[in-house]
Image: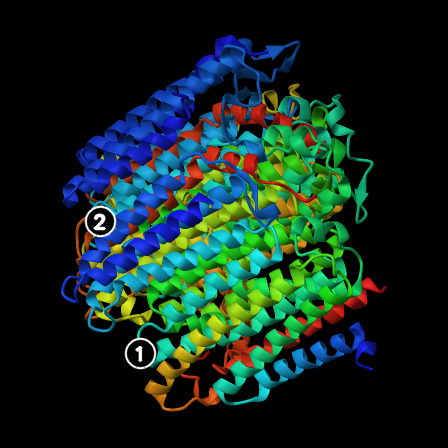
Amino acid sequence: MIDKIGIEQFMILSTLMFFIGVYGFLVRKNLITMLMSVELILNAVNINFVAFNKFYYPQNLQGHFFAMFVIAIAATEVAVAIAIIISLYRKIRTIDVEEVDEMKY
Amino acid sequence: MRHELMLVAVGVIVLIMDLMTSAETKHRIIPVAIVLFLVNTIIGFLPIETGKIFGGMYNTDDITILMKNAMNIGVFIIFLQSAEWLRRHEDRFNSHGAYFFIIVASLAGMDYLISSGDFLMFFIGTELATIPIAALVAIEKARSKSAEAGVKLILSAALSSGITLFGISLIYGTTGSIYFAEVSKAFGNNSLQILAFIFIFAGVAFKISIVPFHLWTADVYEGAPISITSYLSVISKASAIFILVILLYKVFYAIPDIRNNILYATSVLTMTIGNLFAIRQQNMKRFLAFSSIAQAGFVFLGIIGGTQIGFAAVVYFLLIYVFSNLGAFGVVAAISCATGKENMDDYNGLYKNNPKMSLVMMLSLFSLAGIPPVAGFFGKFFLFTSAAKEGYFILVLIAVVNVTISLYYYLLVIKAMFINEQENPIERIDNDIYTKLGLAICAAGILAIGFFGSIFDFINSKTFGAM
Amino acid sequence: MNSLLWLLAIPLVTVFVLMFCNDRRQYRLSAAFGMGLQLIYSFYLVFRYTAERSSGNTEQMVFMHEYRWFESFNIIFTTGIDAISLSLIVLTAIVTFTGILVSWNTEKLPKEFFISLIVLATGVFGFFMTIDLFTMFLFYELAVIPMYILIGIWGSGKKEYAAMKLTLMLMGASALLLVGILGLYTFSSPDANLLSFNILDIANANIPVDTQRFFFPMVFIGFGVLGALFPLHTWSPDGHSSAPTAVSMLHAGVLMKMGGYGCLRVAMYLLPEAAKELAWIFIILTTISIVYGAFGAIAQKDLKYINAYSSVSHCGLVLFAILMMNQTALNGSVLQMISHGLMTALFFALIGMIYERTHTRDIRLMGGLMKIMPFLGVCYMIAGFASLGLPGLSGFVAEINVFVGAFMHPDSFHRVATVIAVSSIVITAVYILRVVGKLLLGPLDEEHAYETGDARWNERWANVILIVSIAAIGIAPFWLSDALIKSLQPIIQKLQ
Amino acid sequence: MITESYSYTVAIPLVLFFSFLLIGLAGGKLKPIVSGVFGTFFLLVSTVLSYYTAYSYFFVDGKLNGAYQKLIAYDSLWLTFTDKLQIHMGVLLDPISVVMLVVITTVSLMVHIYSLSYMKDETGFSRYYSFLSLFTFSMLGLVMASNIFQIYIFWELVGLSSYLLIGHYYERPSAVAASKKAFIVTRFADMGFLVGILLLSSFTGTFDFLKLTDPNGSALTQGSAISFLGLSVMTWSLLLIFTGAAGKSAMFPLHIWLPDAMEGPTPVSALIHAATMVVAGVYLVARLFTIYVFAAPDALIFIGYIGTFTSLFAAVIACTQTDIKRVLAFSTISQIGLMMGGLGVSGYAGAEGLGYTASMFHLFTHAMFKALLFLCAGAVIHAVHTNELWEMGGLKKFLPVTNIAFLIGCLAIAGIPPLSGFFSKDEILTAAYEKDKILFYVQFLVAGMTAFYMFRLYFGIFWNKERDYHSKPHEAPFTMLFSLIFLSIAAAVSGFIPFSEFVTPDLKPFESHIHWSIAIPAIAIAVIGVTLASVLYRKDSDLPDKISISLGGLYKAAHRKFYIDEIYMFITKNVIFNYISAPIAWFDRNIIDNTMNGIAAITNFISVKIRGFQSGQLQQYAYVMVSGLIIIVLVALYFMNN
């Protein structure tokens, strides 16, 4: 059963994750949740890379490596983002994205 | 690879010094860092071997070196302009070392970016360039705007890199490689590949602030410390434009129609919307943000034909743009630093007490607007010429009309400085030697570059055209 | 050093010297010295030019010199003059010099004023002495921009509005112009590597008629806006009336001529087939310009507005003549440029001087000034007579050439247009005499305490120089006209 | 082909130009009287040269094979239009130009001398003399012109001098208005002149009089075949040229400026607005007579009718005016009308050219007696300081010399033999009689009216009731009297010049004699006119008032100059100013200007409207970004699949 899982399923999963991530980014009001949505997007990408590598191009490891770099960089990104969000929270006492609109027009 | 390594070395030295200095002596880092960076800049000009390493992951040639050197000069000017600001805001953050280190690191990221030969390097370069900058944008802890700008930058940058990455993954899936050279061979008229291309384009366009991916720009520029704003608007944008050209003509050259149509449409949108927003801005940083959005639209005129000379015009324009925009930002920075004033109204009667700064500002704005005899004129003219040579006359006409609109708001600033009067114009500002030097370099660049035609010819001899 | 480059070098050195001067006396002396030198040099060039021609040089352009600039685009800074550009250079030198004399007592920021003024003049000199489109365009814009600052800082009335309107309209026009120039460049040669901005090269290229049809309106309107082409003339009244005296002089006297010159040298010369096809549209517009400007002037009350509308009318005549495309009319158009340049400069100079003494420009509030300032009054009358085309002064020579040339077309469209244009001489007489009557003649209005005193020495000299030039052309037009006709031949051949 | 022996004639006008520059530039520095003497001296030089020219032309070497020659005495290229079409500045000597030289210099010299004392106490004495020099220069240049464009050039210049001299008292608003009116009306006419020249030259390809007026030349036939609105192009162009002539010579309906021009100093009126400039129109038609008569005879008929009508029209008005200078002005208009009428009825060859000869003859005699009348009027005004006829009277005992001079002038103009007017008018009437009876009867009537209104003037001034004068009127000083006496003699005797010996259209002399069958009725009607005037005005009586009241509306209309001025005023003030100029100015300021401003406003408006995109909301930014991306993808895929 499990060996019947083909590239299509991975593709469907990753696409779903990507769009769920985008959707989450667009509608969730909490900055941290938005950050998590981004993580969903990045993980969708990772699934893609790994799946493509595994199914189509097993002779090289480019996909796998790429996925690892993505994971690493996502981590740094999150670290910096969280730091900034904390800094923001200190100033305006909220992490609701709709409150973050001091600058506009 | 020397540029990147040099930058890392400079960064590390500054960081170590930062560790070894006490709070009272922190400001001594400033001259050391500047001198170090100057040395780095000068070494950058020394001859260097070109070629590929890491199996084509990283490559360097004359034009990338030229670009890196131009970016070095730009950062050097930014450092000069930020010295005063750093010293005055010592109380707000006491890590000058971090400031220099982060910028140098980000610059190294951009160097990697423009040298990249595969999508992994491209991705790493992008992130290395962006993430530290997001931290710097939010560095002014005392201002909520700074943190807000940081949040907006890091989140939207994350989204855009997610989109880019998704595109890259599709490219990988359809072509089986992440190397530019191999991807380009396998790339063709495949819907999925075009989808991927557009995703990647969107990611880069986000960095260049192309409409409709530009909305973060103004807020981030306004919220960030000025030196970071100038860094974002000049260095970051220039490197992104450069890599866009590489992508378009070294990787995705097989779809000229779609490419040109996208460029055409986004170019028109970018110029027009950037200008329309810029007209009403009162905050100088926001004003320059929108003006730089519009400028990016003009650059596409050079890119669209895909000719060698068009690309040369783009690089030439970027070189000039570095000086022009940094000149304008330098003046804004100096005034903001000395008086905290950033609004256009505050500039009324500036000429009375600060004639030299007003003149530099005027030169920079004229250069941005493309008024002869300053360099910006030549930059724009060549962009237009290269587009016209490919037959895009209507696009050129739209662009030139936009130049006229842009002239309107640039003139508003000039009007404020020279014509308007107010009872209490900004007092005479005594700039430190660094700021003066920085502004002088900008002014000299703006005045001189156009007259030396050989600069353009040199660039032209180094660039490449569509394959 | 190439003899034409001095025309750029002298003003630039003057600007440089001005930067290091530090009191008003030094500013004005060095400005006057520099521009005086320029004037002398331009006369020397006339002498050189005549000598060159009489020694048998029959090249279209003399003193040609090429400076390679941007090899990749084949942009070559090419200097060269013929009688047309030379006469306009002399005109510019005269007007600039008198402009500096007139602004002798500038109070506000004199250094900046003279620098801007000379930069503006440099743009004009550069425009007339080059024969490649790139440099021409560069100098064109260089001349337009200082205008903004000059009007904005030293102007009067709604100066900011006027300055902005003027600059934007002219730059908007230059947008069209730029596209036109790039079009000419692109089609200058079938070989993409041999494209050229050089006017003489482009003249030899065979540009397809369809292409010409597309670019001719752009170039013509682009330059035409500067030449106050109806209905795009509206920058002119506000701009002229807000500008300080010397700037009005330079602008109406010289800058507007760049429009006419450009139409002639670029639009007509390089795009002749389209010009022939599309001329009728612009003939209608210019005919309207001529009459419209003149009628508009009748209803004005402000001296500068009157003169601005009159400029619309006269510059309309320049473009009108250019569109008539024969030797006589083209000769007339160049003569009209020179003549209008001189007399409108004189007008604006006088208006400035009168304003300085009466503190008003409203003709209803003045009267009988001839009694207290006879010198200025006489000068004003002479300017007025030149403007209404009195024989013996330059305006007549120009207008006659235009009318005779225009009337040579045998078809009734051209003739009707000509007759309408001729009617402007009457309307001009009406508004000129109306102003003269109200302003200078009649009983002296005792209610207004005018600052008495006739012209000072600098003002006298400025007026005398201009009047002598006007009269010289008016009394002995043949030398100028003959030289112009020779230089016009290449253009006429293209238009046949 | 230049006749070298006459090349000195170019100095005749140039001397005066020099005089103009000298007095004009140095005028302020010189003593007034010195300027006057200078001016007079230079004019004397010109006069002597003119007389010498006339003598040698008419009596020594002007004739060849029994016909006078058209000599080009000087010629230089002035302006090139094309290889064929050029303006030259030249001197053309032929009978009419030589006659005009004599007339102009004579009258001008008299006026110069006269003005030395007449204008003595005026401010602007130097200015006056410099302008007189300018005028005389221009007028001489006009008559000596060798081509039609040169005429046009000097035509404008005389207009200018006239403008300047009418406005001599520039502080007087009425003088300013009059000068302006004179200039603009003639300018309007000149526009027709200019278009006429353009039209003429475009068909004949030349401006040159020698070519244009050569009866065998090709110029005459070109253009005749092309017609426009039923008339040949030649006729059109000549009619347009005549418009110019009509403007300068104050033909109906362009006569309105001349009466107002009397605002100028009286000697100026004598010189410019009676003797010389106003007859330039006649001169122009005479100059182009050949082409009129051959190429456009219908234009010539038109000229004859216009001239005759004007003469009647002006004579009627002259009977009702009370300002003595205006009476003289209308009389001038009337006499010029006669001259035009004479030209209109003339033929070309031999005795058929009587009208032409008569016209030039009348021009000559009229110049003498009308200048005389004006100068007398000046002397009178000088004495009583008013222009109003009814404020004068009984002056014959105060001003005996003036009285005699004025009487001679009146007799001359009335056509009483043996004074000059009789001869010239007789020839005009004869010519009209032979050609067109209607014109003859009208002119005949005019002759009677002329006698009437001139003697009305004479009796009104010198006889009638003596008024209360502020100071006792005194006779003019010698310089003025000298001019009067000189001109009286000229007016009296110049009729005996056998004009047909000298001035004929085909340049060949013919015999002319007095046609008593016409002369006797003409004398009779003149005598009737004089008698009538003497009955009415020699003594103070209320008869004139009664007559004028009984005439009612007609009198009033004539007195108000048939409301022509009001019509003009209506057209210029209401139609042109209020309905053309003001709306154009409004249109420009509001419509065109606001269109430009509107473009700017629209840009701004859009800019305000789209600012909602930049809401500060991060998620909205992301939303725009993602939807932009999706749109690009969709569009790209759509295009790819098509």
Residue D86 in the image, given as x and y percentages of width and height:
60, 25
Looking at the rendered structure, the kind of residue marked 1 is Arg
Image quadrant containing the N terminus of chain C: top left
Q: Which residue is mark 2?
A: C110
Image point (63%, 48%), residue name? B387
Q: Which residue is mark 1?
A: B143
State which chain disc 1 sits on.
B
Residue D253, located in which quarter of the rendered image?
bottom right
- In this rendering, the answer to whether D381 lies above or below C207 is below
Total marks placed: 2
**In front here: C313 or D52?**
C313
Residue B126 in the image, given as x and y percentages of width and height:
52, 61
Question: Along the horizontal axis of the image, is B259 left or right of C396?
Answer: right
Q: Secondary structure at mark 1?
A: loop
Residue D211, located in which quarter of the rendered image?
top right
Image point (47%, 62%), residue name? B128
**In front here: C478 or D127?**
C478
**In front here: A20 or B337?**
A20
Residue B385 in the image, given as x and y percentages of width and height:
60, 44
Question: Along the horizontal axis of the image, is D10 left or right of C424?
Answer: left
- In this rendering, the answer to whether B270 lies above or below C380 is below
Image quadrant containing the C terminus of chain C: top right
Question: Along the horizontal axis of the image, is B238 left or right of B396?
Answer: left
**In front here: B464 or D1?**
B464
